[in-house]
Amino acid sequence: MVKRETVDIVGDLINSMSIVININTIVDNLDNTYTIETCNTGYLFPNYKFTIDGVNYKVLDEVGKDFVFNEKFTIEGNTIPTGLVITLPELKYYHGTVIATKSELDKKQLSVDKFPMVYLLEVLEDNFNNEDDSRIDRNSNLRLFFLSETAGNDWSTDNHYDYSIKPMRNMVYNFINYINNSNKIGKFDTYKAINHAKFGVYTADKGHTRRVFNDDLSGVELKIDLPIIKTKSDCNNICN
């Protein structure tokens, strides 16, 4: 039997996860800025730029137009957004060793082409179930890092939490909700979320001492034993 690799299954899950911000109210501030009330700000954070229907917008954080996590935010653009939802671009997905992923990130010059990201750290461990009548094909022990770009040492610890860790925790919860309802994933009882401000090499007594990648990042690590269900798409043919 030819099985799909876990890295590809996880990539499919990440790429098919919809990141939607429901607009409760929107106020035109009459200066090309628009204040939106919502119960979910997704992975948005101040100064983040995104596009809706070909119109460029920037998230603001200033007096009277402050960013309030999962409550409201103000964006700047030439046209008021239409519709009741904002669908954000999918998270960028990477997997591999630290060295290989660092090299891949360095090849991309624009931050928008690589962040926010989900990084699956390899080597990963798959525990396969060899019983024919088992619904679960394997349990995969995963370390996934949900990361966004930061201003490094220019940010206080609170900045890292407000502008990166909280949005990335949103994405962890969004991912958990998504796989809870996926027909590709079995039931799991627990998972662990770990905050990483100034993400890098970590030691217990010193915290993060140096960057893992060349970019300044913060975010949340998700540790999970993922039960992957057997699928009919597995190939039973023997290739000669």
Image (cartoon, rainbow, N blue to C red):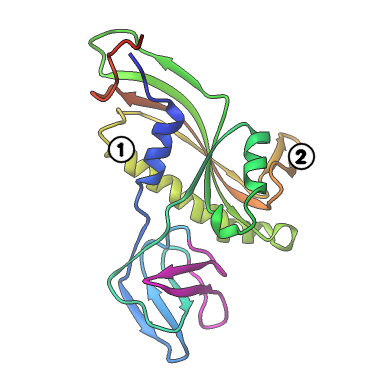
* Vertical arrangement, residue 94 with respect to residue 122, above or below: below
State if disc 2 and disc 1 touch (CB < 8 Å). Answer: no
Crowding near pointer 1: few (<14 within 10 Å), some, many (20+)? some
Q: Which residues are magenta?
A: 44-68
* Vertical arrangement, residue 83 with respect to residue 88, above or below: below
Image quarter of residue 163: bottom right
- Closer to the N terminus: mark 1 or mark 2? 1
User: What is the x, y in percent for residue 142?
Assistant: 49, 29
**Residue at the spot 39% in from the left edge and 45% down from the top edge:** 15
Which amino acid is tagged 1?
A: Asn
**Residue at the spot 30% in from the left edge and 19% down from the top edge:** 136
- Does residue 58 show up magenta in the picture? yes
Residue linked to disc 2: 206
User: What is the x, y in percent for residue 183?
Assistant: 25, 33
What element does badge 1 sit on?
A: helix
Q: Quadrant of the N terminus?
A: top left
Image quarter of residue 9: top left
**Residue at the spot 27% in from the left edge and 14% down from the top edge:** 236
What element does badge 2 sit on?
A: loop
User: What is the x, y in percent for residue 46?
Assistant: 55, 68
Count numbered badges in the picture: 2
Crowding near pointer 2: few (<14 within 10 Å), some, many (20+)? few
What secondary structure characterizes most of the magenta part? loop
Q: Nearer the viewer, residue 194 or 217?
A: 217
User: What is the x, y in percent for residue 109?
Assistant: 64, 56
Q: CA distance from mark 1 to mark 2?
A: 36 Å
Where residue 180 is drawn, which disc sits there? 1
